[in-house]
Image (cartoon, rainbow, N blue to C red):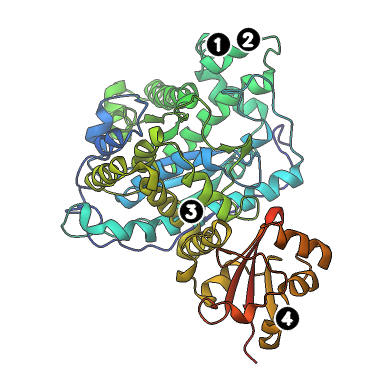
Amino acid sequence: MSLFKLGRAFGVRSGLASSSLSSYYSFGSRRSVGTNIVDDLTERGFVANITSPKLKEATMKPISVYLGVDPTAKSLHAGNLLALLGLLHFHIKGHQVFALVGGFTGSIGDPSGRSSERQALSPATLALNVEAITFQINTFLERGQRYATKYSSDYGTGKAGELKSPKVVNNMDWSQEITLLDFLRTVGKEVKVQHMLNRDSVKNRLSSEAGISFTEFTYQLLQAQDFLHLHKTHQVTLQLGGSDQWGNITAGIDLIHRSYSAESREGHSKSTHTPAEIEEKEGLAVRKDKAWGLTIPLLTTSSGEKFGKSVGNPVWLDDGLTSVFDFYQFFLRVQDADVERYLKLFTLLPLKQIENIMTDHNNKPETRSAQRILASEVTELVHGQRGLSKAQTQTKIIYGSDLPTLTTSDVLEAFTDDPRLKFISREDLDTKISVLIAKEGMVPSRRAANTMITSGGFTLNGQKVTDPQSTLSSVCLIDKQLVVLKLGKAGNFVVCVKDE
C-alpha cells in the first residue's frame, strides 16, 4: 500500500478543443512560432529570471510548457492572474501548454514565501478545490483564446498555425501510488541535502522561530518529481512560476539532468558502448539539456502592497466570491503610477497602443481613461463579454454615470436575482414616490421616505428630488422602462416598469 496515498484520486483531466487564431502571431510554419516569446514577455515586464539564455533559441520552435498551482482554495485570485497570462501567451504563440493542479502537493502546501505552515485541508475539501480550479483554468484559457482574436492583426501576419489544445492535469494521478521506497530510490537518491538546504524557501524558514517541518522540507522534491514526470511523459521542457518558485523550479531541472545521467550510467554498466554512445542511442544527450525555468515577478503596487487584494481581502476570479462589479472596480481603482505597467501585464493590447493610451491619459488624468480601458480589458479576459457588460451596467447605475445610455435588456441581465432591481406596473407611475419606495421595501417606512426626500438624500435618474408628493409619471423613463433611484445610505435601486 502506498505511503503517499491519500484516498481516491480526485483530479480531472480535461482540455479545450483545438482552434486557430487567424494571424494572431506569425507562426510561419510548423517549425517556427515567429517572434521570440521570451523577448516579447521581457518587454512587457513578465520575466524576473530565466535559468538559461538557451531558452530564447529553444522557444523559436514549439515546446511544451507547464505552470503549477496548488488548490489551497476553491478559486484562484488576482494574484494568480499574472502566471496564468504567462501561460496564455505561450498558448496563443503556438506552444503546448499544461496547467498542473496540485491535488497531491496541495495536501502538503508549498513553504515558499510563507512564515508558517499551511493548515492542512481535508481530502473532501481538496477534491472540491481541484475540481473547481480545473474548471476555472479551462475557462480562463478558452476565454483568453477568444479575447486574443481582438488583436490578431497587431501580432504579425503569415500563415496561422493550429493551436494545440491546452491540457489540465492533476499530480495525484501519478503520485498517489508511489511508495516511500520507490521515492527514495528514484528521487531521493538523486538529490543532495545541501542543495535542498540552500533553497531560499528552506533557509528563510530554518532561521525563523516557526522552523520548517519535514513535510514542507520535502515539498521541493515533490514539485521536482512533477517536472520530471511531465518531461518524460509529455516532453515538457519549461516550467513557469512566480519568482518565489525559483528554488523549486531549479530543483526540478537538476532532477531531470541527474535522472538522465543515472540512466546513462545504468545503461553503461550493462553495455560495452560508451556513455556518450548510449546517450545518443537513447536520445538522452539531446533531451537532458532541454529543461528550463522562467520566473515571473511577484507583483506589488507602487505603494509597496502585495497585488491582488482589496481592503485586505483576495480579489477572486470566481464571480461567486468576488462579483464582476467588484472585480471591475478593483482594476478601475488602480493608481496612475501603476496603470501603464498593468496594461502591459494584464492585457494583450499592443505596446504601441498602450503608449497612445498613456499619452491621452497623461493629458487628462482626471478622466481615468487608462484605468477604464484596463478594467474593461481584464474583466473581458476573465469574465467574458457578458461579464464585462454586466460590470459596466452596474457601474453606470451605482455611480450614476451615463444613465441615458442604459438599455433595459442590459439592466435585466446585469441585475438578475439582485434585490436592488424592482418591478412595478404602469399604474404605479402615478403613485407618490414616498409611498412607492416604502411599499417596495427600499426604506423601512413611509415616514423614513419622507424624511430622506425632504432632506435632499434622494435622486431620480441623477436629479435631486425634494418633494415627497412627486410621482414617477413626471420622470423621463430611460429606454421607456427604467428609473434609477439613489436613496442616501440605502444605496441605488433600479425600477423597471413592466409592460402588460
Give the crowd class for mark 1: few <14, some 14-19, many >=20 residues within 10 Å.
some
How far, Cα to Cα, is label 2 from label 3?
39 Å
* Percent coordinates x, y for residue 351 in the rendering: 25, 43
Do callouts 2 and 1 mark residues in contact (Cβ within 8 Å)?
yes
The reply, left or right, for residue 6 in relation to residue 370 is right
**Amino acid carrying mark 4 in the image:** Thr
Of callouts 4 and 3, which one flags the residue occurring earlier in the amino acid sequence?
3
Residue pointed to by mark 4: 431
Is residue 264 shown above or below 171? above
* Percent coordinates x, y for residue 363 in the rendering: 28, 42
Task: From the image, state whether disc 2 or disc 3 is nearer to you.
Answer: 3
**Amino acid carrying mark 2 in the image:** Leu
Task: From the image, state whether disc 4 or disc 1 is nearer to you.
Answer: 4
Task: From the image, state whether disc 4 or disc 3 is nearer to you.
Answer: 4
**Amino acid carrying mark 1 in the image:** Leu
- Nearest the eye: 315 or 86: 315
* Residue 402 seen in the current view: yes
The label on residue 382 is: 3
How far, Cα to Cα, is label 4 from label 3?
43 Å
Disc 2 secondary structure class: helix
How far, Cα to Cα, is label 4 from label 1?
76 Å
Of callouts 2 and 4, which one flags the residue occurring earlier in the amino acid sequence?
2
Residue at (44%, 36%) from the top-left corner? Answer: 335
Of callouts 4 and 1, which one flags the residue occurring earlier in the amino acid sequence?
1
Disc 3 secondary structure class: helix
How far, Cα to Cα, is label 1 from label 3?
39 Å
Task: From the image, state whether disc 1 or disc 3 is nearer to you.
Answer: 3
Disc 1 secondary structure class: helix
